[in-house]
Image (cartoon, rainbow, N blue to C red):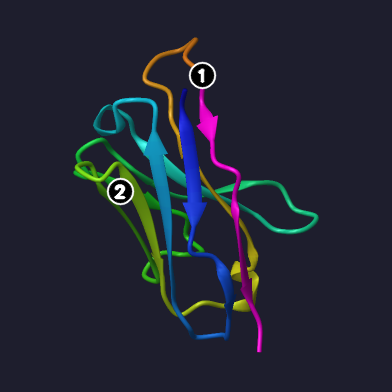
Amino acid sequence: QVQLVESGGGLVQPGGSLRLSCAASGFTFSSYGMNWHRQAPGKERELVASISTIASSTNYADSVKGRFTISRDNARHTLYLQMNSLKPEDTAVYYCKRTKRYSGENEYWGQGTQVTVSS
């Protein structure tokens, strides 16, 4: 079955960096676009970054442009999010998501990893 397992979260000081990973299994990873989303306490889940199947196209939320980089290793079935210059407002649970190739197909989410930016 499809599984997405995030890792790499933790506590970091403002200005610091973290790299999140999302290990995928149970499907052909290279055939799907992938997203990173986040949800802060009391707020709706938001899209942070997306990447196409062969990483030819990436998109970012305005709030993270220039600081975060999404990437993927199709050989290792792994999605990454490099987060630099972290701010307290980046504090959230971060989720990876497998997107749909066609309507009627399921989306899949990981369990999330907590990122806390605080001094």
Check residue 94 for magenta coloring. no
Nearer-the-camera pick, 12 or 27? 27
- Residue at 44%, 78% (x, y): give it: 17
Amino acid residing under circle 1: Asn
Tell me residue 11's x, y (percent).
61, 77
Toward the viewer: 66 or 79? 79
The quadrant of the image that shows the C terminus is: bottom right
Residues in magenta, as a range: 106-119
Q: Which of these two is toward me, 71 or 7?
A: 7
Element under disc 1: loop
Residue 21, percent from left and from top: 41, 56
For image coordinates 40% across by 71% down, the residue present is 67
Q: Residues within 10 Å of mark 1 (few under 14, many from 20)?
A: few
Q: Residue at x 25, y 44 (%)?
A: 57
The location of residue 49, given as percent across then percent down, is 43, 51
Residue placed farthest to the right in the image?
Answer: 42
Which residue position holds label 2? 58
